[in-house]
Amino acid sequence: MKKILSVLFIFSLLFTAAACGNGRSGVASVQTEKTEGGSSQTAADTSSKDEQVKATESLEREPDAEEPLETGTGTSADNNNSGGSHILVAYFSLAGEQYEVGVIEKGNTEIVAEMIAESTGADIFKIEAAAEYPATYEELLEVSRQEADTPPEIAGTVENMAGYDTVFIGYPIWWGDTPTIIKVFLQSYDFSGKTIIPFCTHGGSGLAGTERMISGLCPDSTIGEGLAVRGSVAQNERDSARESVIEWLTDNGYAEKQK
Ligand SMILES: Cc1cc2nc3c(=O)[nH]c(=O)nc-3n(C[C@H](O)[C@H](O)[C@H](O)COP(=O)(O)O)c2cc1C
């Protein structure tokens, strides 16, 4: 009991600090800030669902103003050639029971991924684990906590990764970080010389410094400006989410193929 109370107290302190420094709500829109890297497993000690929700809320973090990431807008004028798009949208996303949105048929990140692909004419690839994830939020929290020790295997591969010069990579924020499967994906291909553009959905954390983690794993890639959309907005306020996506793509020179 004492341990639970201390954990809750730490989370409430973190949440207060985050709430003071960060007025984001609804669509987190384009994240122009660069955030610190590394993983944050601070939620991992909690056990009940309420505690997990508090932990999720508390993971909203202030950006780190230290050394900026190398960023770039990549090419956009003509992404297609006769062989197909030079842009890939690769994403991980889960349906089932999710934070703030109940049981969903399509994952929050998948909704955003589809908007990006539709607006850019990109190819799209869903990153899926070989073993199915549980459909309940509680079980998912449990399974996700074990992944750092036992990384999931990915089912399927991207054909001709070498043919893409730009890869949008999408994920939900898990424990203030990318899900482990994203790291597995990034380590499975050679991203040297490519532009990687992160996007995420989240329950309050924003990008949570995941761009820096991606930069660390792919040091020879250019990391583009990321986008963070709140999961509940992607799921339930799609016009607003699409507006943010299109604004971000336009700002970065990728929206020429809007439909
Ligand atoms: C295991 C797990 C951990 C999570 N951790 C965080 C977190 O640290 N910060 C946050 O803002 N949201 C967190 N969330 C909420 C998800 O990021 C959010 O619901 C997301 O939109 C889910 O996307 P998906 O439907 O594409 O999988 C977590 C959700 C799960 C299942």
Image: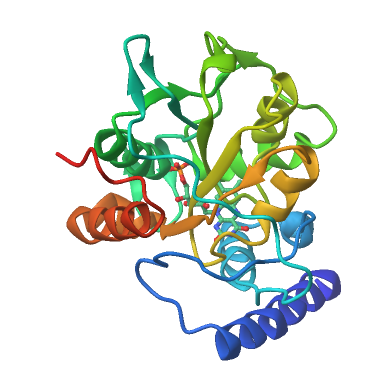
Q: Residue at x 18, y 56 (%)?
A: 239
Q: Residue at x 67, y 82 (%)?
A: 12
Q: Quadrant of residue 55?
A: bottom right
Q: Report x, y in % for residue 188.
A: 72, 20
Q: Report x, y in % for residue 105.
A: 30, 34
Residue 122 in sight from this viewpoint: yes
Judge by depth and name the residue closer to the eye, 218 or 240: 218
Judge by depth and name the residue closer to the eye, 120 or 39: 120
Quarter holding the C terminus is top left
Q: Quadrant of residue 115?
A: top left
Judge by depth and name the residue closer to the eye, 190 or 46: 190
Residue 10's place in the image compared with 67, above or below, is below
Residue 105 in sight from this viewpoint: no
Q: Report x, y in % for residue 254.
A: 35, 45
Q: Residue at x 50, y 43 (%)?
A: 74
| Name of the residue lying farthest toward the front | 77
Q: How many marks?
A: 0
Q: Report x, y in % for residue 143.
A: 67, 35
Viewed as shown, does residue 26 lie left or right of 20? left
Residue 100's place in the image compared with 160, above or below, is below
Judge by depth and name the residue closer to the eye, 133 or 250: 250
Viewed as shown, does residue 27 lie left or right of 61? left
Task: State the scheme by which the image is colored.
Answer: rainbow
Q: Residue at x 66, y 53 (%)?
A: 210
Residue 141's place in the image compared with 230, above or below, is above
Quarter holding the N terminus is bottom right
| Name of the residue lying farthest toward the left | 259
